[in-house]
Image: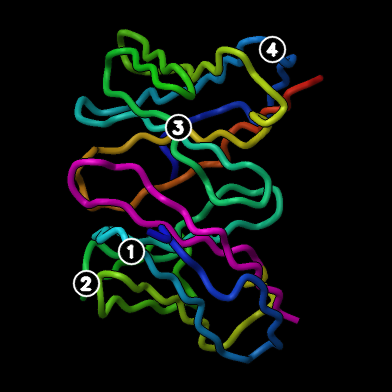
Amino acid sequence: DAKTTQPPSMDCAEGRAANLPCNHSTISGNEYVYWYRQIHSQGPQYIIHGLKNNETNEMASLIITEDRKSSTLILPHATLRDTAVYYCIVRVANRDDKIIFGKGTRLHILP
Amino acid sequence: NAGVTQTPKFQVLKTGQSMTLQCAQDMNHEYMSWYRQDPGMGLRLIHYSVGAGITDQGEVPNGYNVSRSTTEDFPLRLLSAAPSQTSVYFCASSYAQGRETQYFGPGTRLLVL
């Protein structure tokens, strides 16, 4: 089973920041938080990952709480092209074990 | 560099027929995996491989076989297709060590009648 809990769907107005939450209360000390997204009919796309520090790249920011039991993916200026299903995954980096996706959050960007 | 390629893009099968979904990557990735995605559902892991000659089961392996004779290829076999296997199938690959980003193929849409 997936180790994360995400809301099934969210709405966000175009141009506003989209904040997608993820709960991972059983995360271990050596597990990273990864985010992927899947735009309709396409294969999933990697967005960002982190261990305990906040991370930022050209696509998004990842905020991880101090106790690491939850995190938030932030899309700073959402556009219609950000409409997708967003998946939060926890796993140990550099391990050969399987990667399990949950059901994700369906993000609707409203014009 | 083509990334992860999958063939065919679409396939219609009759119940009981067999077929192989092809997946290939040219990035020298050790880790490869197969997922299925049903309408409105998330991705479910079928089988995965951490290197040539090594495969293991995922969440929903029944009805599917895999093999990994080369680093580049990871075919998924349906020995006797069933309507419950109607789905979209995605293949993915990544480095086993270091970078953990998974790269996904475009998917194969399978309809079993």
Specify how the rendered protein is coloured. rainbow
Q: Residue drawn at (65%, 67%), measured in percent from left and top?
A: B109
Are the numbered discs 3 and 4 placed on the same chain, yes or no?
A: yes
Is label 4 in a helix, a strand or a loop?
Answer: loop
Mark 3 = which residue? A47
Q: What residue span does the magenta drawing correspond to? A: B87-113
Which residue: 24% across, 60% down?
B30
Q: Which residue is mark 4?
A: A15
Residue positioned most to the bottom: B17
Residue B99 on the magenta span: yes
**Mark 3: few/some/many CA within 10 Å (<14, 14-19, 20+):** many
Report the residue marked by disc 1: B26
What amino acid does circle 3 point to?
Answer: Ile
Which quadrant would residue B53 be assigned to in this image? Answer: bottom left
* Element class at badge 2: loop
Spatial CA distance of label 3 from label 1 is: 22 Å
| Mark pair 4, 2: CA separation | 46 Å
The residue type indicated by label 2 comes to Ala
Label 4 CA crowd tier, 10 Å (few <14, some 14–19, many 20+): some
In the image, what residue occupies the spot 30% across and 67% down? B56
Q: Position of residue A69 (x, y in %)?
A: 37, 18
